[in-house]
Image (cartoon, rainbow, N blue to C red):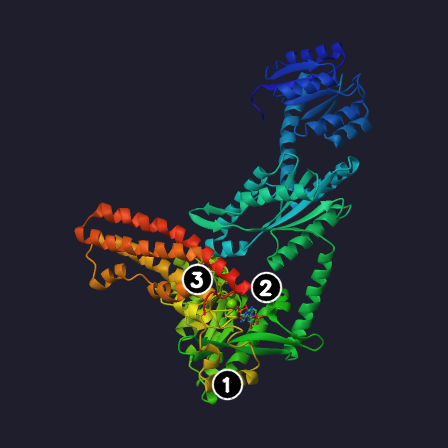
Amino acid sequence: MVDRTLKVLLVEDNPGDVLLVKEMLHSAGEHRIELGYTNRISTAREILEGTGIDALLLDLGLPDVNGLDTLEKIRRIYPDLPIVVLSSLEDEEMAVSALQIGAQDFLVKGTINGHLLTRALFYAIKRKELDSRLLFMANHDSLTGLYNRKFFHEQLNRSIAISSKHTRKLAVLLIDLANFRGVNDTFGQAVGDQLLAEVARRLQQGVRKSDTVARMGGDEFGLILEPVHDEVHVSELAKKIRENLCRVHTIEGNEIDLDLAVGISLFPSDGPTAGDLVRKAGRALQLSRETGGLPLQYYDLSMEETLKIRKELRSEFSRALKNHELVLHYQPIVNLRTHSLWGVEALVRWNHPERGLLFPGAFLPQIMGTELIVSMGDWVLREALSQLFRWTNKGITLSMSVNVDLLQLRKPDFVSRLTKLLERYPSIPPRLLELEILETSTAEDFPNLPEILSDIHDRGVRLAIDDFGTGYSSLAYLKHLPVDTLKIDQGFVIGMRNNRENLAIIESIVSLSRIFGRGVVAEGMEEMEYAPLLIKLGCDHAQGYAIGRPMPAEGFMEWRREWLANDGSEKLLPLPPVNELSILSTQVEHFAWIQHVLSLVQKASSTALSSTEEKVFSSPPAQEWYLKEGRAHYGSIPAFQELDSLHRESQEIAREMLRFIHERNIEGMRYDSRRLLLSKDTLLALYGTLQKDALFRSILDKPECS
Ligand code: C2E
Ligand code: MG
Ligand code: MG
């Protein structure tokens, strides 16, 4: 029982009855009840707002309202308040109704005494506590304390009713945590549970008082945002929610980078019922999840069409696999320096009976994440190896690169099946097979990946990271992967010419690959003119339309014959120096030189430099370019003249630096380092201007000199 003093509010219009109740309690010697009273429901509300009333003793026959209505109203406003109803009538029906509405007890005046009344009040409080707990359990999720799916639906119905009445709008958001399975697999379920609780907490913190947050099950959460003005408003709210959640969460010392997919439907535009809204938000979520699409995906009707097409394509594709409609095309990868043919990349195509030859972009996204990609991958591997076998038998040695999806690698028997496949072709050295995995798929949500890759690598098969530069591989992670090759994403190579950032990225990927002792291949070499620059950057291998497009096996053989016949020279030689590219490559060299000088100065402060190292100070790169080609082509462009003098100035600084080094003048070394560093920014701007001006001039076609 409760053993503290209870504050009970009596709402009673008859002063005689008030006295009677007081008297009853007094004569029962009951000191644990502190009785307050009011005769009107309107004042009762004021009192309830202010003080901590434990229970309400309510007379059903009040002057200002109808009794049961009053009860219902109070129940709605104070759902947790225990209520005992007093009535002067012995009205069975009324008693049942009062209990149904939510009163804890029904007492008839004149038939009770002080003890009974006290007991009724104490029981009412206990019963209410129990009711509340049961109700809480029925409506809440035990792990996160959020509302559950059942309550979410009930609340949505209520919200819809209110919104229709006031012609207001509301939004339903379904949120799904990306890679939650990975979190459970990697860090264990206890951490997964804590992450869910953390998400729940942040969700609840991040919404308005009028919004509802629920856990729909697993890693899916549901939100009712009400009221909302329009789509822009919903997006603002949803963006805030995302920002609050999409970050690194530290749980028990583990860093978990969380991402979400969000599906959104709106009332009234997406339908009049809770079922409609939840279903449509679910469709939007499904689309966002499957395509890795927009972070906030609104439902729209075309989605049904997209999902339908996807479903049809999947069943068509599974038929295509059985009907041998897939083919492989092979794209050459060559060494730009030696012109030798290094190997091919196998690229899948679908020979569609009606639509003709389909490229991966037309079907891979639709089958991503399904078993179909695994079956396709199996076929590709078998076919690529049998082709490699045919070539090897003819004495043609080539490396065969095959794209592998993460889902294939996740199959527990992948390595053993690969081993069996290789055993079928003992004449093929396993190092001729290179598996390419996408950089984005090396994410840390696949804890066993390094182990599986090591297993594969131990069998002699080479590994490459595809589309490198597009993901977020950390250096530390990369260092631990047994990867042989980094394939620079074609976007950087294609964009190399007119965007110096791309150039800088390529440069850093190449130096990264050097540091870790990996090979590097540039993808997307669309123009032969890139070759000298790629070579200069240290990237010797390339693949791209300029060298050869992906071709069927026979076509590739023909291409190869031609390539070998003229040592690839027809394409790779002569390497016409394109003017703008020569500016770019000079810039790269110049920057590399400054960097080198700066690092040597740093070294010189602790150890002596070798004579080769000292030579670097007096031999700036591109000297010849400035004196000959550069001056001849761009001598009249003001930016070139400025560059020329800046170039000379940095030469002088470097010479002075060397003197300071010999004199062990640390201050002087520091001073000159700063000067050289400062000149970098000016150089960058000047090279940019020169390139632009040169480009304009070439467009206007006014060659300056012969
Ligand atoms: P990827 O592995 O990065 O393959 C290179 C893509 O770039 C190929 O597109 C190729 O045709 C294209 N390409 C080559 N040279 C150039 C160029 O100079 N310029 C431009 N713009 N593009 C060039 P494709 O064949 O359409 O394949 C697209 C992607 O589909 C592949 O990108 C790969 O991620 C995936 N893929 C292809 N075959 C398979 C496969 O058998 N299994 C799996 N899982 N994925 C595959
Ligand atoms: Mg590839
Ligand atoms: Mg690629």
Q: Amino acid at mark 2?
A: Gly
**Residue at disc 3, CB closer than 8 Å to ligand 1:** no
Element type at marker 3?
A: helix
Name the residue located 59 percent from the left edge and 57 percent from the top edge.
292
Q: Amino acid at mark 1?
A: Glu
Q: Is residue 522 left or right of residue 49?
A: left
The reply to whether the C-beta atoms of the residues labelled 1 and 2 are less than 8 Å apart is no
CA distance separating discs 2 and 3: 54 Å
| Local SS, label 1 | helix
- Measure the C-alpha gap from mark 3 to mark 1: 38 Å
Instruction: Relative to 569, say whether 295 is above or below.
Output: above
**Which amino acid, mark 3?**
Tyr
Q: Is residue 152 above or below residue 399?
A: above
Q: Dividing the picture into quarters, in which one does residue 69 lie?
A: top right
Judge by depth and name the residue closer to the eye, 238 or 551. Answer: 551
Tell me which residue sits at (45%, 46%) in the image: 250
Characterize the local packing of mark 1: few (<14), some (14-19) or many (20 or more) Cα atoms within 10 angstroms: few
**First in sequence: mark 1 or mark 2?**
2
Q: Which residue is labeled 3 in the image?
A: 634
Residue linked to disc 1: 562
